Image (cartoon, rainbow, N blue to C red):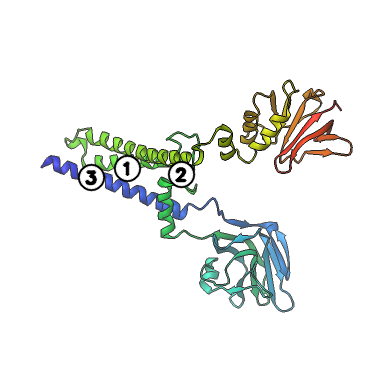
Amino acid sequence: MSGLRHFIRFVLAICSGTLAVFVILWLSYRFGGDPEAPPIELRGGDLQVVSGSGRQTDAGLEVSASDQSGVVVIQGAVRPFDTVRYARLSWQLDGLSEAQELRVLWASAASRAQPPNRLLSEQERKDGVVDLTDETAWDGRVIAIGLVVVGHLTEPLTLNRLDILPKAPTQGQILQAIWRDWTGDEGWTGHSINFEYAGPGRTSFSPTLQVAVWVAISGLLYLIMCPPWRGHRNATPYVAIGLLGWLILDVGWQWTLVQRIDQTQRLYAGLDMIERQEAGPDRDFYPFLQEIKRHLQPGSGRLFILSSEPTGYAAGRARYHLLPVNTFLTETIDSGTSLHTGDYVLTMMPMSTVRYDRSENVLVIDGYRLPATLELSNPSLGGLFRILGES
């Protein structure tokens, strides 16, 4: 009977630990924010008076007078955003009287002559927050947004901030996100099991961390229910909790491996080495690199790969695919680079500091001029130049 009680407490501990981790994840997704839709914060120069008179102060945008019709329009300078992600507006406005109306005004890409607006309730004015989710006109892509005050001013208004906030996720979206943490797969990444994370990036709780928290909480709960100072000194339940956590993590990892092996088989089965490269992650620039490799004769001069990110993925893969060509990665070329006649320069786009003067056959790199001929080019990838001499 004592063993059965211990087993029941063990099951209760791991179930309670599971519930606790779920609650932590739910709260994190509910209130942690979405990196893909961060709050749009408008301050200082982002706010301007469109109708009425005002100026910027240390406290914010100060509006001293309305227009002749008693209307003040304050607009926030925003980049267009999608109403699918954003629906709440928050502000801090001082000096508003009860006799004045406060409205939120916006214009979308689908708006016609008259932009839609919404009269704010007394509670919304007090809270400084409005949710526009249920507004039928809140649809599409918003290109402008602001506040409207109707009524002559009895004292200056000061708008300290205007924020556009993302929508709060629904229960279903939170559950999908938690499920995606364990079942989603971003493909081969080179990460070990300890750093593998297939979720959408909205929280910092990787599966490894989730399991570690679960093991800690479950072990603590069992310790509380079966304290060692009451004679419960068997370490087996704690070892079992740790092994169960490891098993859960490993099963998830094995499932991910099965998915990736199946994906790899469907993508590469039956292809030779060149066809695999053309179907793989380097498929956008591999053909151009092979064209360069065929163009460079054995014994050709050195090849300098000029990239804004010489330690980045694209530059490194370019160097790999060009083997056994003698290549050098660099971020810039100047008089100290020691280029010789017959050497080559491969510019990898985008490079704002590089241009080629066809009329004079001169390659200009951040002001440094090199006589060169354009051998090969790809508008989206870059160009191969043969050096004719030093500047």
Question: Three-letter amino acid code at disc 1?
Answer: Ile
Nearer the viewer's eye, disc 1 or disc 3?
3
In whole angstroms, how far apart are the C-alphas of marks 1 and 3?
A: 13 Å
* Residue lying farthest to the right in this orientation: 360
- Visible residue check, residue 180: yes
**Disc 3, disc 2: CB below 8 Å?**
no
x and y, in percent, of residue 65 in the image: 72, 71
* Residue lying farthest to the top in this orientation: 299
Q: Which mark is residue 55?
A: none
Nearer the viewer's eye, disc 3 or disc 2?
2
Front-most of 338 and 340?
Answer: 340
Question: Quick one: label 1 or label 3, which is nearer the N terminus?
Answer: 3
Residue that label 2 marks: 185
Residue 51 left/right relative to 184: right
Question: Quick one: label 3 or label 2, which is nearer the N terminus?
Answer: 3
Give the SS element for disc 2.
loop
x and y, in percent, of residue 76 in the image: 66, 62
- Visible residue check, residue 162: no
Residue drawn at (69%, 75%) of the image:
113
Question: Three-letter amino acid code at disc 2?
Answer: Asp
x and y, in percent, of residue 329 in the image: 69, 28
Give the SS element for disc 3.
helix
Residue drawn at (60%, 78%) of the image:
99
Question: Quick one: label 1 or label 2, which is nearer the N terminus?
Answer: 2
Q: Residues within 10 Å of mark 1 (few under 14, many from 20)?
A: some
Residue that label 1 marks: 217
Residue that label 3 marks: 11
